[in-house]
């Protein structure tokens, strides 16, 4: 969206609660993850993925691709990293008030939200007790974490 706004000459602020771009591909997936859609339908039409990428790119490929995209379109200088939005609320005249965790407030004519739905871990509640190790899928990064363990995977849904 930032690239489209910039190309259209529309002024914008871009904030990200993380310390770098890439969202889930930067900090949320395990090291051997790959995208489940083909690169030919995942890539930006005006910025194709490299020809040497596999049909289903890895997490590292996705991080590299998103970084090259940001660099190619010179988007980084507009990104305010480590800026967490506390809340957004509509105000008069179709404007929006955005409040950051540091208390700063800004007024905007529009807001585009990329809410990071993988950011907060949620655990379903089950009856009974379990005294073993419980981890969230977000905390799984390497196969060694589970090697020689008996594992139960529970799909609690989004």
Image: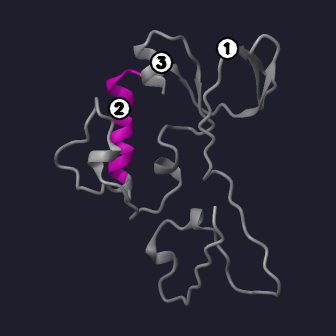
What x and y, as percent, mark residue 69?
Answer: 35, 32
The CA span between labels 3 and 2 is: 15 Å
Nearest the viewer among 67 and 38 is: 38
40 relative to 147, above or below = above
Task: Name the residue that disc number 3 marks.
Answer: 5
Task: Name the residue that disc number 2 marks.
Answer: 69
What x and y, as percent, mark residue 77?
Answer: 47, 20
Q: How is the image coloured?
A: one colour
Name which residue lies at 33% across and 41% down. Answer: 65
Dot 3 alpha-carbon crowd within 10 angstroms: few under 14, some 14 to 19, many 20 or more: few
Q: Earlier in the sequence, mark 1 or mark 2?
A: 2
Local SS, label 3? helix
What x and y, as percent, mark residue 70?
Answer: 39, 29
Query: Residue 121 appears in which quarter of the rendering?
Result: bottom right
Q: Is residue 158 left or right of residue 63?
A: right
Q: Earlier in the sequence, mark 3 or mark 2?
A: 3
Name which residue lies at 49% across and 89% down. Answer: 148
In the image, farthest residue toward the left:
51
Name which residue lies at 75% across and 87% down. Answer: 131
The CA span between labels 1 and 2 is: 26 Å
The region drawn magenta spans 60-74
Name which residue lies at 28% across and 29% down. Answer: 46
Dot 1 alpha-carbon crowd within 10 angstroms: few under 14, some 14 to 19, many 20 or more: few
Report the disc number at residue 147. none
């Amino acid at each position: 969206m930032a690239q489209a706004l910039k190309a259209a000459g529309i002024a914008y602020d871009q904030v990200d609660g993380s310390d770098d771009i890439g969202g889930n591909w930067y900090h949320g997936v395990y090291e051997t993850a790959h995208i489940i859609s083909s690169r030919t339908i995942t890539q930006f039409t005006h910025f194709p993925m490299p020809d040497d990428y596999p049909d289903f790119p890895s997490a590292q490929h996705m991080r590299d691709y998103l970084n090259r995209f940001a660099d190619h379109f010179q988007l980084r200088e507009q990104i305010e990293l480590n800026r967490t939005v506390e809340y957004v609320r509509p105000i008069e005249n179709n404007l929006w008030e955005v409040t950051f965790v540091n208390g700063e407030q800004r007024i905007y004519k529009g807001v585009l939200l990329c809410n990071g739905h993988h950011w907060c871990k949620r655990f379903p509640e089950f009856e009974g007790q379990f005294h073993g190790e419980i981890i969230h899928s977000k905390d799984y990064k390497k196969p060694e974490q589970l090697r020689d363990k008996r594992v139960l995977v529970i799909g609690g849904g989004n």
